C-alpha cells in the first residue's frame, strides 16, 4: 500500500513517514500543494494524508484537484482547524475522513487501516495452494482435511493469506489482529505462529508459514494446487 503525506511541517511529516513505514506502508512526502498534485498525477496512491495549511495553496484546493481525476485515492485530512464548520467543509469537499491535530498516532493508524480496507474487495474464500479459508463460515481446510483454529489463530491466518507473499511485521500482525500497539517485548505473535504451524504445516511437506528474518512472517505456497478433473 502506497501513501502520500502532504505536510509542510518537516517534523510532523517525518513523524508520520516513520510511523507509517514501520507499519509496512510505502510513504512519499510532499511539502506543498503543487508537489502533491504533481505526485498524484504521476503515481497511483492508495491513500493521501492531507494537511490544509499548506504554504502555496489551501489544502481544500488540493483536494479539489485530486477529485477531478477519474480514479482518486482515499483522502484523510489532518488539520489543526478544529471547528465543526471546517470538518463539515472538508468532508463535503470530498475527504473520506478528518482528524484534528494534535492527534494520537494509534488513532491515525486505525483510521488509515479502515480507509484502506474500504477500497479492497473482500472475497468469501481464500485459497493458497491446498490451504483453503472460508471467511463467512470461518472454516479452514488443507488438502480437504478440516483444521480447527482458535479465533485469534483464524484472524492471523486470514491476514497472512490476504497478504500472500508479502512479509508482515509483528507490529502489523498485532495491530491488525489485536488492534493495539506492539511494544517490542511481547512474544504473543511468535506463540500464535507456532500454534498455527503445528496445525497447518506440520503434517505437510509444503511449509507455508515462513519466517522473514528481521521482519516477521509471510505465508505462501511453493506448490501448485492439483486441478480437479485432471
Image (cartoon, rainbow, N blue to C red):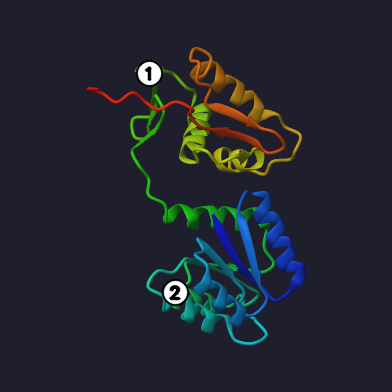
Q: Determine whether the residue tagged by mark 2 lies in a helix, strand or loop.
A: loop
Q: Is residue 8 above or below residue 212?
A: below
Relative placement, left or right, of 128 versus 103 is left
Q: Is residue 74 above or below residue 148?
A: below
Residue 188 appears in which quarter of the rendering?
top right
Residue 52 appears in which quarter of the rendering?
bottom right
Count of all numbered marks drawn on residues in the image? 2
Split into 4 quadrants, where in the image is the N terminus? bottom right
Q: Few, some or many C-alpha atoms within 10 Å of disc 1 (few <14, some 14-19, many ≥20)? A: few
Residue depicted at x 70% and y 76%: 8
Q: Is residue 176 above or below residue 130?
A: below
Judge by depth and name the residue closer to the eye, 170 or 109: 170
Residue 39 appears in which quarter of the rendering?
bottom right
Q: Position of residue 158 (x, y in %)?
A: 47, 34
Residue depicted at x 44% and y 18%: 148
Q: Determine which of the numbered discs, if any, sits on residue 143 in the image.
A: 1
C-alpha span from label 2 to label 1? 47 Å
Q: Determine whether the residue tagged by mark 1 lies in a helix, strand or loop.
A: loop
Split into 4 quadrants, where in the image is the C terminus? top left
Q: Position of residue 44 (x, y in %)?
A: 49, 65
Q: Is residue 76 above or below residue 226?
A: below
Relative placement, left or right, of 15 versus 66 is right
Which residue does the numbered mark 2 point to in the structure image? 94
Q: Residue furthest left?
A: 229
Residue depicted at x 34% and y 18%: 144
Relative placement, left or right, of 56 versus 159 is right
- Mark in the foreground, 2 or 1: 1
Q: Determine which of the numbered discs, if any, sits on residue 50 in the image.
A: none
- Looking at the image, is mark 2 or mark 1 earlier in the sequence? 2
Q: Position of residue 184 (x, y in %)?
A: 75, 38
Q: Few, some or many C-alpha atoms within 10 Å of disc 2 (few <14, some 14-19, many ≥20)? A: some
Residue depicted at x 37% and y 49%: 121
Amino acid at each position: 500500500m502506497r501513501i502520500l503525506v502532504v505536510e509542510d511541517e518537516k517534523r510532523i511529516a517525518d513523524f508520520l513517514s516513520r510511523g507509517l513505514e514501520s507499519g509496512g506502508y510505502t510513504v512519499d512526502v510532499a511539502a506543498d500543494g503543487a508537489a502533491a498534485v504533481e505526485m498524484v498525477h504521476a503515481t497511483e496512491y492508495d491513500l493521501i494524508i492531507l494537511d490544509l495549511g499548506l504554504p502555496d495553496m489551501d489544502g481544500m484546493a488540493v483536494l479539489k484537484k485530486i477529485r477531478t481525476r477519474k480514479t482518486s485515492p482515499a483522502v484523510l485530512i489532518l488539520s489543526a482547524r478544529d471547528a465543526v464548520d471546517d470538518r463539515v467543509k472538508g468532508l463535503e469537499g470530498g475527504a473520506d475522513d478528518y482528524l484534528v491535530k494534535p492527534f494520537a498516532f494509534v488513532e491515525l493508524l486505525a483510521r488509515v487501516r479502515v480507509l484502506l480496507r474500504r477500497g479492497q474487495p473482500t472475497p468469501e474464500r481464500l485459497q493458497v495452494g491446498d490451504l483453503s479459508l472460508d471467511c463467512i463460515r470461518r472454516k479452514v481446510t488443507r488438502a480437504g482435511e478440516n483444521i480447527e483454529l482458535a479465533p485469534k489463530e483464524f484472524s492471523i491466518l486470514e491476514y497472512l493469506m490476504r497478504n500472500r507473499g508479502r512479509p508482515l511485521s509483528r507490529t502489523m500482525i498485532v495491530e491488525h489482529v489485536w488492534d493495539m500497539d506492539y511494544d517490542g517485548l511481547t512474544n504473543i505473535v511468535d506463540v500464535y505462529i507456532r500454534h498455527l504451524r503445528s496445525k497447518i504445516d506440520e503434517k505437510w511437506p509444503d511449509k507455508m508459514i515462513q519466517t522473514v528474518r528481521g521482519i516477521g512472517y509471510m505465508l505462501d505456497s511453493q506448490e501448485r494446487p492439483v486441478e480437479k478433473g485432471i
